[in-house]
Image (tube, rainbow, N blue to C red):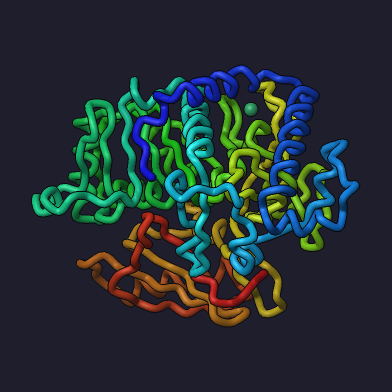
Amino acid sequence: MIVNKIYNYPKFRKRLFFLNKSQKWSKYQHEKNQLYNLRKLYNYVKKNVPFYKDYFSGRKNFKIKTLDDLKKFPVIDKNFIKNNYKKFLSVKMKKDNTFSRTTGGSTGNPLTILSDLNFQINDKANTFHYLSIFKKNIKKNKSVRLYGDKIPQQILRKKKYWYKKNQKQLIMSAFHINSSSIKSYVKVLQDFQPEYIHSRSSIMFLMASLILKEQIKFNLKLENIFVDGEYLTFGQRKFIEKIFKCRLINIYGHTEGALVGFNCEFSNKMHFMPQNGIIEILDSKNNNLKKEKSKGIITATGFNNYMMPMIRYKTGDVASIGKKKCKCKRNYFFVDQVEGRLQDYVLDKKSNLIPLAPAIFNYNDMDWKKIENYKVVQYQKGKIIIQVQLYLKTKNEREVLNTISKKLKKILPNFIIKIQKVKKIERNTIGKQRYLDQKIKII
Ligand SMILES: [Zn+2]
């Protein structure tokens, strides 16, 4: 089912109004609202979702009295849902009113999430809400959408990788950004003069690197760049902000749609919206972590999707808990940094998990300027393969490759590193690029 202009629904306007109003709520008000939503969800799933119907059939006296009762629900993850797929779908689901999106295809473990119109409305309201925090509106401000959008053939034939959707929005495809096209991309941006860009961190990082390499001068009056769907490191943020001369806003929103987080007006901490669900940070034994700075896995309970509910869904994203307060005064759950997904870690010989992103994205240590694209592959503990795509006219190829190898060995001393030259590194269909292809099963 495809619905255009969700923002014309009265329900959408009501939800957006609610989000704007409730951001000033006290912790108590949020918890009261969460408890109400959790009870409502429980009453629904025990009647309509086979997995929970079975689970609670032997627990007839179970009632949700406090938010702590969430702990009585089993922790689930992607594989568990995949193996019991139909049991997680509501019996009330109607085919002609169902939306679907697929998550995690790039890791080779896709999961199709089904939802109804109500979920879509709430989802869109979340986007409008965080944009409004930065005084942006998709209908009023000029913006660019730079993802893996398909560009119609007749436009591609003219060597154009973008088109105007309307006077306010330009759609650009990330698939064609390279050293020979970057000048035209920048020129089109400059002619259009967007107030903000919506994209992914790897795409903006690639653009910024090419702009620097080709020494392109430009004059953009960008106010913000919003990125989502991928891990963002400190080094990447600094570099993108420096090249584009504006603040980057990181958004957490996994395809499963159960949690939404954003950076606020004042801070780069991730602010998780209590209106959409409950976030827990769990350790490997599913214990609830509460202390500041403790590191665990983001586990989501979403209030918006009744067709395929996610309750205590372990996302695989590793995060460390942040301070309880922020200058913006929102009483939200704060995470200092979403460090990446479990699949984004490499294993050393002793099976220690080493986050790869800070090592390879730290622009000061690692010089990727001479490289068009790269990907890391791990088949064996303690050993990684770096696939490198060089620019077409690269001189002294061997020297370039040796330099990378030497630098990486300094950053990752416990690894055997092999550099492999490849012709092209592919993006997947939604324009996401996984910089690590982890072949070892980590979870
Ligand atoms: Zn804040």
Given residues 439 and 31, the one toward you in this image is 31
> Can you say whether 71 is above or below 330 in the image?
below
In percent of the image, x 88 and y 46: which residue is there? 62
Q: How many marks?
A: 0
Q: Quadrant of residue 216?
A: top left
> Can you say whether 364 is above or below 123 in the image?
below
Left or right: where does residue 153 sit relative to residue 362?
A: left
| Residue 36: image location, x then y, percent | 75, 31
In percent of the image, x 60 and y 39: which residue is there? 304
Left or right: where does residue 30 sit relative to residue 164?
A: right
Q: Which residue reaches farthest right?
A: 61
Q: Quadrant of residue 416?
A: bottom right
> Can you say whether 17 is above or below 59 in the image?
above
Given residues 174 and 53, the one toward you in this image is 53
- Quadrant of the rendered image holding ligand 1: top right
Q: Is residue 8 visible?
A: yes
| Residue 143: image location, x then y, percent | 32, 31
Locate the C terminus and report the quarter of the image it occupies. bottom right
Q: Is residue 78 visible?
A: no
Locate the N terminus and report the quarter of the image it occupies. top left
Q: Quadrant of residue 4?
A: top left
Given residues 355 and 50, the one toward you in this image is 50
In percent of the image, x 23 and y 30: which residue is there? 166
Left or right: where does residue 183 sit relative to residue 139?
A: left
In percent of the image, x 48 and y 38: which residue is there? 117
| Residue 391: image location, x then y, percent | 26, 65
Q: Which residue reaches farthest bottom?
A: 380
